Image (cartoon, rainbow, N blue to C red):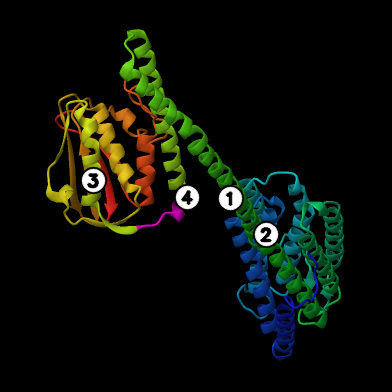
Amino acid sequence: MQISVTKSYLPRFFVGILVLIGLYFASIYNFLLFHSLAEFFSIFIAFTVFSIAWNSKKFSDNHYILFLGIAFAFIGTIDLVHLLAYKDMNVFTNYDANLPTQLWIAARYLQALTLLIAPIFFVRKLKYNKTIFVYSIATVTLLALIFARVFPDAFIEGFGLTDFKIISEYIISTILLASLIFLYKNRNALERGIFKLIAASIILTIFSELAFTFYISVFGFSNLVGHYFKIIAFYLIYVALVKTSLTEPYKTLFKKTKDSEERLKRASAVKDVFIDIASHDLLNPTTSIKLTAELALRSEKNPKKKENLKMIEDCSSNIIKIIRNAKSLAKIETSEELKYKEEDLGKILKTTVDNMRSTATKKNMDIKGVNEGINGGKFIAKVNPLIADAFSNLISNAIKYGSEKSEVTVKIESKGRMWQISVANAGVNIPEKDKKGIFDRFSRLEKNTKIKGTGLGLAITKRIVTAHNGRVLVEDNPGGGSIFIIQIPK
């Protein structure tokens, strides 16, 4: 990314100029006011940097930036104490201008060493708790040494800066220069624009430190210039962290989402082609095989041949069912294309029951409706025609797994904001351990029986009901067997 004053940067540029001009006039009016505003701005940025880094650690894998974020919270803490300790703030009595100067040096040493160490985390994973512990110890130790008057003097009233303060500023500048070189060697680990922002921040921090080697009074001009450089340096770190932790991850996320959408579209197109092939090139010949087997069965007298023809008929029926189930699943999985229309669920259910009566008769079973709903009562809901397949699957299963000469009971009723359709049969209860996965694809419970199925019927039912914002569940029938329930919003 090119760092330049383009149209997108002009508003920030002018706002920045206005802020610096405002701070200058504040320094003329009252230097203490200027210092408080300048330090508060830097402290606010430091804690904001920490907050963003900490809260973005779950989706940002840039441990370099995360390390800077954590470190700046502690640097900001010492700067806050420095602000409160400044001359004429009268927060810490019995201390002179030496105290804020010592705190300044301590914070800058911590900042310089942080920037020097940080590039290590281009290749190493950051341990958050350990980092926080180390910085906590370092910060508490520095504050204890300063307030215990053990830390070397940095400023003497009437004399100015001590040799320790001046030499420290040059040492800090040297450490910052080394950190800049270290960062440059690892520049490929950062996006180009972010590297420029951090490098510029380090350079400005060096200028800030050099400015602080000249003043004699804590209210002097070089102090003003040094704070200007510090403000801009902190702001550049803030911009770099926002781009890395927020802007860039979201850009990456959106790009990945777009790529995923394209892959899904391609996969959907391939799936549609496959379904078309299955429907036409497999369904048609399989149906022909089934019809041929049925016709041959009518005239065949040889028991062995009849058995083989019956096997062919059953297998072809199963293949046809699998193909049709696959088509249903394909429609449901593109549910955004499903169209919904207000219909009477009672009428749909009645039609489904009538269509299934012949299947029930083959097992000497009967389908019974216990209310007027399935005879055309008003049970209005917005549904897609696929809902009939869901009803059909449940009734078909109830017949398939029900005991011979028993009844399948179909019921529809109002349950709050839902219409509840229940289908109960008499037979063996479903074990509790199997109920959870019964609606999964290819889930079969009759592994030790001769009952045939594809293992897709209930999975399709669940997909259809879910597409209607409904739910499907299974309960034990008190008289033996199971009750399958569909709930559809009114």
Quick one: label 2 or label 1, which is nearer the N terminus? Answer: 2
For the residue labelled by badge 3, is the local secondary structure a helix, a strand or a loop? helix
Question: In x, y percent, where is residue 277?
Answer: 54, 38
Nearest to viewer (mark 2 / mark 3): 3
Question: Of residues 205 and 166, which is closer to you in this image?
Answer: 205
Question: In x, y percent, where is residue 234?
Answer: 72, 68
Quick one: label 4 or label 3, which is nearer the N terminus? Answer: 4
Residues shaded magenta: 335-340
Mark 1 sits on what residue?
A: 265
Question: Of residues 184 and 138, which is closer to you in this image?
Answer: 184
Residue 147 in view (yes/no): no
Mark 2 sits on what residue?
A: 248
Name the disc covering residue 334, or none: 4
- Mark 1 Cα shell of 10 Å, populated few (<14), some (14-19), many (≥20): few
Mark 3 sits on what residue?
A: 351
Mark 2 and 3 residues: CB-CB less than 8 Å, in contact? no
Mark 2 and 1 residues: CB-CB less than 8 Å, in contact? no
Quick one: label 2 or label 3, which is nearer the N terminus? Answer: 2
The amino acid pointed to by label 3 is Thr
The amino acid pointed to by label 2 is Glu
Nearest to viewer (mark 1 / mark 3): 3
For the residue labelled by badge 4, is the local secondary structure a helix, a strand or a loop? loop
Q: CA distance from mark 4 to mark 3?
A: 26 Å
Quick one: label 1 or label 3, which is nearer the N terminus? Answer: 1
Nearest to viewer (mark 2 / mark 1): 1
